[in-house]
Amino acid sequence: MENIETMPKQIRVLLFDLGGVLIELNELSTLLHLNGDEMPVNKLWSDWLSSPAARAFEMGISTKEQFADKYIEETNLPIKRNEFLNAFTQLPKGLYPDAHRLIERCRDRYFIACLSNTNTLHWQRLIHEMGIDGMFDQHFASHLTGKLKPDRESFEHVLQSLNCDPSAILFLDDNEMNVKAARSIGIIAYRTEGVQEAEKTLEKIGILTVS
């Protein structure tokens, strides 16, 4: 975990990434290297974020069928559309233990929001199976906003929607690219993986009292 300083008092918004922070993901092999090739995780995610097919789907501008066909073509995956879509739909495994408890610990003093690159297939599961709808005061889901992390516009949209200064937002994400992008416009951001690390970070900062 990186060095953490005491958090400024002006923080009023806690902004959480979902996958990798509050929601556990199945092995990336389920989706990103079904062809059996070994590849570092950071390279897998970098390739995913630069994929035209993935970007279009997670910006809400293509159908699931268009997404699957174009992604299979881009990556030369030796599978059929339905096989790919079934594997892709199961990428979110479920909420990490204590995810709800962490959000409840923050709720009394802060406005709680999520900022997630997601899509229609995953969003239905997040809402109906995992019950995230009631966890947050506001959702910023990429397929609904049309804006993706780590693009600057994704973070600017949050600032405009919440009508607040970037220094009033604390953002937690498991992807260093997203953390750096948030910091570049003045948002206070840290890389954390899983609920336990997120909770420890918030405690060290002073957002939460040590339990």
Image (tube, grey):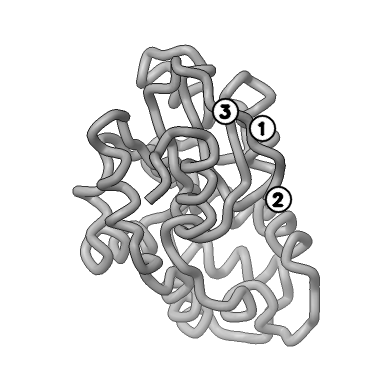
User: Which circle, 1 or 3, is nearer the viewer?
Assistant: 3
Task: Check disc 3 and report the residue beneath it.
Answer: 6
Residue 38 spot, x, y in % from top left? 80, 80
Residue 66 spot, x, y in % from top left? 50, 62
Q: Residues within 10 Å of mark 1 (few under 14, many from 20)?
A: some
Q: CA distance from mark 2 to mark 1?
A: 15 Å
Task: Check disc 2 and report the residue beneath it.
Answer: 50
194 to the left or right of 140: right
Q: In the image shown, does 165 or 119 lie closer to the viewer?
A: 165
66 to the left or right of 182: left
User: Mark 2 vs mark 1: which is more N-terminal?
Assistant: 2
Residue 138 spot, x, y in % from top left? 29, 35
Q: In the image shown, does 84 or 108 lie closer to the viewer?
A: 108
User: Mark 1 vs mark 3: which is more N-terminal?
Assistant: 3
**Quarter where residue 95 is shown:** bottom left
Q: CA distance from mark 3 to mark 2?
A: 35 Å
Q: Residues within 10 Å of mark 2 (few under 14, many from 20)?
A: few
162 to the left or right of 202: left
Task: Check disc 1 and report the residue beneath it.
Answer: 181
Name which residue lies at 44% across and 80% down: 86
Identity, as a three-letter code, of the amino acid under mark 2:
Ser
User: Which circle, 3 or 2, is nearer the viewer?
Assistant: 3
Q: Is residue 82 above or below residue 108?
A: below
User: Mark 3 vs mark 2: which is more N-terminal?
Assistant: 3
Under tag 2, what secondary structure? helix
Q: Is residue 161 above or below residue 25?
A: above
Under tag 1, what secondary structure? helix
